[in-house]
Image (cartoon, rainbow, N blue to C red):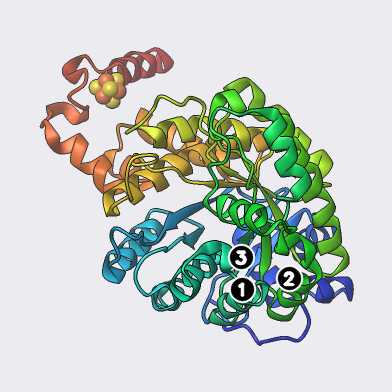
Amino acid sequence: MLDLPASRMTQLELARKGVVSPQVKWVAQGEGLEADFVLQGLLEGKIIALANAYHKNVVPCGIGKGLRTKINANIGTSSELFDVDTELRKLKVAINFGADTVMDLSTGGNIPAIRRAIINASPVPVGTVPIYQAAIQAIERHGSIVDMTVDELFDCIEEHARDGVDFMTVHCGVTQASIERLKRQGRVTDVVSRGGAFLIGWMLHNDKENPLYQYYERLLDLAREYDFALSLGDGLRPGCLADATDRAQIEELIMLGELVQRAREADVQAMVEGPGHMPLDQIATNVQLEKSLCRGAPFYVLGPLVTDIGAGYDHITGAIGGAIAAAAGADFLCYVTPTEHLSLPDVEDVKQGVIASRIAAHAGDIVKGIKGAKEWDEQMSRARKALDWETQSKLSLDPQLSRQVHNRIPCSGGTCSMCGKYCAMAIVEKYLTRGAVK
Ligand code: SF4
């Protein structure tokens, strides 16, 4: 873990001066790459390193081209259930099972206190969506989200930055023009992004432009001051297969590409969020569109879910889409839990979501040619061939489960209970070896 100096220069400013920051060194070391490779990626905006200097003891996380595909686990309270200890247990499980980052999406209870508890307990970068807190505080103060002031929104963003939030989802690409396009489009599920919905309600009621777009420079100033990364949210992401890759979604993506460019010019790191729900055969095209329109900015996809009918199993529909997206070049996968669309996830749901997403990311990494990815699988295959159950457990994503399942039905002869004494591995090993001796 790093105790980062609160530098007055952002990582991007340091990179432009040719300085290898501690964050860059840490990311390079973790990936087994040269620091110069990460530095170059940072300069081009194709890699970002998440680490707010105010997040004490954070392990910087690199996201982008040439790096291992990362995964994020969303935790946080809702208005219906808000218990900080449960959220801290979710955090622990998410990290234990390999989440590279977590997002605190709390909308219930004492939101600032919960966020601070999560940041203090988290060695991995923490992301938030500040509009949630700003909107809920506006209801408490004024009786309605639509009465939120622009200053209240930006004060909230600064509060998150000061608390050490490493990346923030900001729906800057939702504009009055994109809302008009959305209306003309005629969607099945209109808007499914909570942050996007809050902003659209505010914009329509007040007949004003999105403050995150209109005052983007103010946002960039804050991001530069605290060196947090922008996660340019897709407020108009498709919420069902029928709405995928429509004009509203692509209009927003074009806008996000322009905002990425302005962020880079301001020495602010930015990534772009993407769908959502999407037929399997549109995923690679969407990754290519993002990479082209946003000039290689890291792509953070929310799933994507490849069918709308997986309720209760959406960690699977999300992992299918995530694997295809990662293989096509997506850099960061937001997990989906079995309770997606149904309920707030519990600790076990978080574990299931993380494991599913890690499988997806790793499957993508094999195709991307990420160092060590193929080798991991090969080690597992050799352990399988050798009927070496302990090594197989150690190499699996959930060693404890692997051991438990293998030991569930005792089996003599060193094989497993699937084929027992007719184990193909054992039979072929015996005769192939004998053949080799002859
Ligand atoms: S018993 Fe069957 S499933 Fe088990 S290791 Fe042997 S071949 Fe594989």
Which residue: 51% across, 32% down?
305
Task: Give how far apart the Cα atoms at labels 2 and 3 are.
Answer: 13 Å
Residue closest to the eye, 247 or 372: 247
Rendered image: mark on residue 219: 2
**Quick one: label 2 or label 1, which is nearer the N terminus?**
1
Task: Give how far apart the Cα atoms at labels 2 and 1 are.
Answer: 8 Å
Q: Amino acid at mark 1?
A: Ile
Q: Amino acid at mark 2?
A: Leu
Rendered image: mark on residue 363: none
**Quick one: label 1 or label 3, which is nearer the N terminus?**
1
**Quick one: label 2 or label 3, which is nearer the N terminus?**
3
Residue closest to the eye, 203 or 309: 203
Within the image, what quadrant is residue 281 found in? top right
In terms of secondary structure, where does tag 1 sit? helix
Rendered image: mark on residue 157: 1
Which of pointers 1 and 3 indicates the residue nearer the eye?
Answer: 1
Q: Which residue is mark 3?
A: 167
Residue closest to the eye, 45 or 190: 190
The correct choice, above or below, for 411 with respect to 49 in the image is: above
Q: Estimate how packed mark 1 is, as few (under 14), some (14 to 19) or many (20 or more) residues with alpha carbons within 10 Å.
A: many
| Residue 369 pos. (x, y %) | 66, 38
Which residue: 85% across, 69% down?
266
Ligand 1 lies in which image quarter? top left
- For the residues labelled 2 and 1, say whether their Cβ atoms are less than 8 Å apart: yes
- Residue 312 as seen in the image, left or right of residue 133: left
